[in-house]
Image (cartoon, helix red, strand yellow):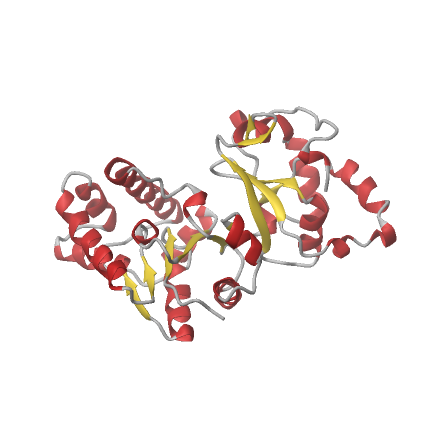
Amino acid sequence: MIVPQSIVFNGDLGSGKSTVSVEIAERLGMRRVSVGDLYRQMAQERQMTALQLNLHAELDQAVDGYVDQLQRDIAASGECLVMDSRLAWHFFTDALKVHMITEPGEAARRVLLRPSGPAEQYTSLEEAKARLMERSESERNRFIIRYGVDKAQLRNYDLICDTTRAGAAEVIEHIVAAYEGRLCPEVLREAPPLLLLDPARVYPTEDIVTLRGRWDAAPGGDVAAAGDEPLRIGYTGEHFFVVDGHRRLSAALQDGCRLVPARLVAEVDEPVVGGMSAIDYFAAQVRPSMIHDWSAAHGIELPLPEPALLGGGAVLAGEPGASA
C-alpha cells in the first residue's frame, strides 16, 4: 500500500526537473506547483535576468519571504502534490525529496537549446555554463545565510538522480518506482539518500589491472552476474567514487546502463574509513593513470579532477576500497 505523500524536486537549470515533475504529476494525478515559474515571472516584471533577481534577493528579503510563505502555506495544507522548487525540501518535511543533477556542460547545452524569454538569454555554451553556475552558487549562499541549510548537501534528500545521459522516461520510471516502494526501499527507509548515478561519471579507486584479476577469478568470469546490490559510493562535493562495487559498476558500463543504484557512504568531510574523509580518501586513492585505464577499458571519458584532488596512495588490504 502506497502512503500518500508529496514529491518535491530540487535541481539546477538544465537538470530536467521541470520536464520530469510535469510528467510525474500527470501520471500520479497530482497538482504541480513550480516556484521556478514564479521567479521567472517576478524577474520579467522587474526587467531582470534570473541571476539578477537572485542577487537582488540577497539584499531584499521580501523576494524570498513572499515565495517562502507560499511554500509554507502549501506544505501546511496537507495536500499531496508535486512541487518544483529549490527549497521545498526544507519546508516539506514528509515529502519524497528528489534532487536532480547533471554534468554542467550538458545542463548548459540543454538550456541553450530551449526557447528563452527576456529574463534568460545566453550567447554561447561557455556563457551559459558560467552563468548557470554563478546563479546556483548565489542561491546556495543565500540559503546558507538565510536558512542555515546547504542545498548541495546530498543528505538533505531522499533520492539523487543523475540525468546526464538518462532520458526523461527512464528517470520517471525510477522515481515512480521509488515513490511506490519498488526501488531499493531499504536504502530509502534506513539510510537515504538513494543515489541513481550515471555509471560513466563514477570514478574508480583501484587499478583496473588488479580488478581484472579478481573478475577473471570469479565463477564463470561473468561480470554481469554481480547482481543489483547498490554500489557503495563516496562524494567529494563534485565527484562520485566507488568505495565498494567496482565489479557491479563495470557490469553496468558494459551493459550500457545509464543509471545505477547506490548508497552514500560518505560525502565531503564525512569519514569513509579510519577517520579519512571522502575528499581525503579520493585524493589518496585516485591517480590519473587509474582514471585513464578505467576510461579506456570501458569506452568512456572521465575528466581528470583538479590536481589538488589527486593523490596516489595504494589501497590497503582490508579497507573498503579493497573489495569489489
**Count of residue discs:** 0
Q: Position of residue 258 (x, y in %)?
A: 59, 57
In the rendered image, which quarter is residue 151 located in? top left
Question: Which quadrant, please, contains the C terminus?
Answer: top right
In the rendered image, which quarter is residue 314 located in? top right
Q: Position of residue 318 (x, y in %)?
A: 73, 30
Nearest to the observer: residue 240 or residue 78: 78
Residue shown at 45% from the left, 44% from the top:
155
Residue shown at 66% from the left, 35% from the top:
205
Residue shown at 67% from the left, 38% from the top:
292
Q: Is residue 211 left or right of residue 189?
A: right
Residue 148 visible (yes or no): yes
In the rendered image, which quarter is residue 319 located in? top right
Q: Is residue 40 above or below residue 211?
A: below
Q: Position of residue 57 (x, y in %)?
A: 18, 44
Nearest to the observer: residue 294 or residue 109: 294
Nearest to the observer: residue 217 or residue 80: 80
Q: Is residue 265 above or below residue 109?
A: above
Q: Position of residue 45 (x, y in %)?
A: 13, 57
Q: Is residue 7 left or right of residue 147?
A: right
Residue 302 visible (yes or no): no
Q: Is residue 316 left or right of residue 49?
A: right
Residue shown at 35% from the left, 48% from the top:
128
